[in-house]
Image (cartoon, grey):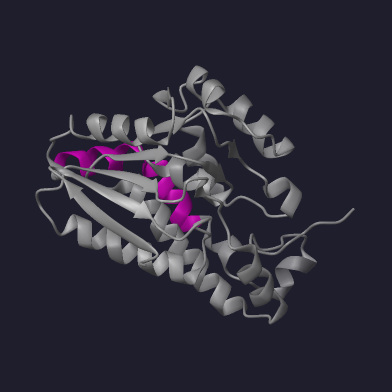
């Protein structure tokens, strides 16, 4: 079974995360970008719905097992390469020339919540699953660009509360704050509603791409100019009190 796959429903591409918890590691990044590029090569596609085949999880974020192993082996070049590829994954959803809609059919934690946040719109099941930023408990920092694109989907006070507490928030509260368009009854309704919404978009790719470039210029500038200092490991950064984003910093 492919890590990521897609199927076509009229003008909608349904992009399916297909690997259980859908943890982010190098294999995930490569599979996601390959599938995404395949989707865009089909000129009939006018929108993308991102979802998961797992009955419990949408995406649980960073593959902690892989990360800790790589960190223990001091494979900093490998981690840096993965961070840049994941930045491409997030950028793909953020800057896609067709609207992107997340059908959140289970837990969306950490990078998984970030991935849903990079999409243009979101639907979420209300009977199961939470939206959560557990980085505070893992000692993981946010890249500057991540903070900016999450600010586009939720009130900043809510984001601060969630990222500093690690609180798990359900669909009802997210709907109240307009983070999601609709809190749906279950996973089937979530996907159905997301696809129906996606089918309302039949806009020019060129026009939307330019609109996004102008709207998100500040995020793109941060990705280009600020994120690299967090992605590229340099021992002297630690001496200056600036650990790279991928280093676990739990402690007193």
Q: Is residue 99 visible?
A: yes
What residue lies at 70% left-to-right and 39% top-to-bottom? 166
Please tell me whether residue 220 belongs to the stretch shown in magenta.
yes
Residue 7 placed where, x, y %?
A: 22, 53
Per the rendered image, the range of residues in magenta is 207-225
Query: On the rendered image, what quadrant is the N terminus found in?
Result: bottom left
Image side of residue 222 versus residue 51, left or right: right
**Residue 92 visible (yes or no):** no
- Is-magenta flag for residue 22? no
Query: Going 72% across and 60% down the picture, which residue do you hit?
Result: 242
Q: Decide: is 51 above or below 65.
A: above
Q: Taken as a whole, is the magenta stretch helix, strand or loop?
A: helix
* Residue in front for this viewpoint, 91 or 217: 91
Quadrant housing residue 74: bottom right
In percent of width and height, residue 113 lies at 52, 43
Tell which of 118 and 207 is nearer to you: 118
Residue 180 image point, x, y percent: 44, 27
Q: Residue furthest top?
A: 176
Image position, residue 71 (x, y; %): 68, 74
Tell me if residue 137 comes above or below residue 74 in the rendering.
above
């Amino acid at each position: 079974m492919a890590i990521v796959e897609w199927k076509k429903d009229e003008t909608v591409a349904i992009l399916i995360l297909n690997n259980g918890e859908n943890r982010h590691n190098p294999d995930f990044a490569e599979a996601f970008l390959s599938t995404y590029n395949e989707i865009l090569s089909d000129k009939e596609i006018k929108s993308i719905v991102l979802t998961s085949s797992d009955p419990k999880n949408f995406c649980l974020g960073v593959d902690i097992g892989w990360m800790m192993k790589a960190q223990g082996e001091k494979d900093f070049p490998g981690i840096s390469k993965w961070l840049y590829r994941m930045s491409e994954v997030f950028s793909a959803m953020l800057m896609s020339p067709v609207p992107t809609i997340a059908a959140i059919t289970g837990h969306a934690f950490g990078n998984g919540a970030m991935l849903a946040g990079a999409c243009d719109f979101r639907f979420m099941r209300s009977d199961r699953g939470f939206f959560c930023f557990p980085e505070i408990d893992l000692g993981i920092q946010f890249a500057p660009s991540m903070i900016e694109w999450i600010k586009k989907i939720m009130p900043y006070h809510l984001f601060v509360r969630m990222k500093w507490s690690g609180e798990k928030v359900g669909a009802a509260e997210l709907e109240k704050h307009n983070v999601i368009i609709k809190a749906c009854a279950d996973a089937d309704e979530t996907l159905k509603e997301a696809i129906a919404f996606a089918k309302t978009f039949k806009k020019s790719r060129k026009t939307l791409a330019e609109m996004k470039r102008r709207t998100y210029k500040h995020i793109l500038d941060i990705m280009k100019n600020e994120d690299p200092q967090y992605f590229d490991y340099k021992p002297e950064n630690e001496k200056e009190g600036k650990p790279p984003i991928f280093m676990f910093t739990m402690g007193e």
